[in-house]
Amino acid sequence: MFARTSALVFAPQCGGQVRNMATLKDITIRLKSIKNIQKITKSMKMVAAAKYARAERQLKPARVYGNGALALYEKAEITAPEDKAAKHVIIGVSSDRGLCGAIHSNVAKAIKAQIAELTGSGKEVMVVNVGDKLRGILHRTHGKHIMLNCKEMGRKPPTFSDASIIATELLNSGYEFDQGSIIFNRFRSVISYRTEKKPLFSNETVANSEGMGIYDDIDADVLRNYQEFALVNILFFGMKESTTSEQSARMTAMDSASKNASEMIDKLTLTFNRTRQAVITKELIEIISGAAAL
Amino acid sequence: MMAARFLRRSLPALRQTRCYAEAAAAGGPQMSFTFASPTTVFFKEASVKQVDVPTLTGAFGILPAHVPTLQVLRPGVVTIFSDDGSAAKYFVSSGSVTVNADSSVQLLAEEAVPLDQLDIAAARANLEKAQSEMAGVSDEALKAEVQISIDANEAIVKALE
């Protein structure tokens, strides 16, 4: 087809170039690409730092609010009856976006552990995923337990209306759970967070609990409204803690990525200079000794 | 025996007189009052004298050592009387109030604003709009929404008058 194919293409042994670990060209390409990646990770760290500052600011009132919502369950020492609770729901709170360290895998691990424990004792479990990453991790192995998936988390800070939408969907889904838990990453500090579980109780559990006896006559309607509101509050609290942990984890992850990238850049620059000097030296020697260069 | 317990609780500065009536003021349970909305905290474990809340079953006032109860809020005004006698008023849209056995009160409002931040003219305008909308709506869910708007605006107007 092409006349050239018949001609002998002289493949030079080119011992000099091939003898080095990589040619100058390869090193240059690598160096450029790593420098670009470092720019990206640096800017991601800046963005995450800004979002973290805002999230932490919003977390302060949200914490007071969330602790207020949980106060009743703690003070009345409401616990789920061990034997009766047959239907369980797990709400895993995370987000859609990656590059934040072990945030999503920690929540998924906790969910998987709890599913294993509950199905082991014969209980029925359904999972609500708040955040697409959780769906990605869970749907292959635990697909049949997944009831609801929520997307578009993590782009903007979560609001009370987001939490109420999720709670409404859960309550309208028709799954009458006896007990539940919400698994989220609780923010401790810029460099640390912890995966925690908070319990959710059904209306019957609360109504029949011993500790509730001291509370002045509460009719079923009021209790149902109160419970629904508490569910939204706890969800909101979990989401706020989760975003703060996520942004701080992303900041840390991007920071270490940038540091790793700059280490690689240093090493590669040294290799590049060494290689460059070696090539020059070799050419000089060839010229001096009169060997035929290409 | 009871007197001795009260005596021990009263500050050492008090004379060692047996005075049962004093004990309630000196060592009685203080109300630990927490009032917050999702975005703002108004009171955090503060000690106040009395809180008036509007609930679905009617408005009632909460003092320290109130009987434990759970209630759901209705759009209306929350008045907080602090220890020095001053009263703070907030308008709340909805939420819940919990009074626990240890006299801690958690008032969680979905939206709460100090009364002076509300404009009565805007509230009246919204109320009229909602009332006129009510006539034209037939869908159940929409009807409930418009009714909520009417209730809330009525409460705001009543609070500001």
Image (tube, rainbow, N blue to C red):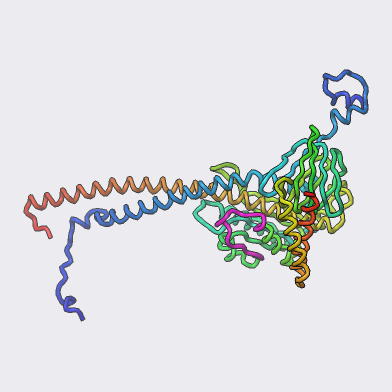
Q: Quadrant of the N terminus of chain A?
A: bottom left
Residue A77 seen in the current view: no
**Is A5 situated left or right of A101 in this image?**
left
Query: Where does the image place residue A2, in percent across and percent down from the top left?
Result: 19, 79
Total marks in image:
0
Query: Where does the image place residue A207, in percent across and percent down from the top left?
Result: 84, 54
Report which quarter residue A149 is drawn in.
Answer: bottom right
Furthest-front residue in view? B121
- Which residue shows up at 24% across the image and 46% down it? A274
Q: Quadrant of the C terminus of chain A?
A: bottom left
Furthest-bottom residue in view? A1
Query: Where does the image place residue A101, in percent across and percent down from the top left?
Result: 51, 51
Q: Is residue A155 magenta?
A: yes
Q: Is residue A211 magenta?
A: no
Task: Please name whichever residue, A116 or B120, is drawn nearer the observer in this view of the structure.
Answer: B120
Query: Where does the image place residue B85, in percent across and percent down from the top left?
Result: 81, 34
Task: Please name whichever residue, A185 or B134, is drawn nearer the observer in this view of the structure.
Answer: B134
**Is A275 situated left or right of A232 in this image?**
left
Residue A159 seen in the current view: yes
| Above-or-below relation of A264 to A294 | above
Report which quarter residue A122 is drawn in.
Answer: bottom right
Furthest-left residue in view? A290
Report which quarter residue B18 is drawn in.
Answer: top right
- Which residue shows up at 20% across the image and 56% down it? A17
Which segment is the magenta one?
A: A146-162
- Which residue shows up at 56% across the image and 63% down it? A136
**Is A148 situated left or right of B142 in this image?**
left
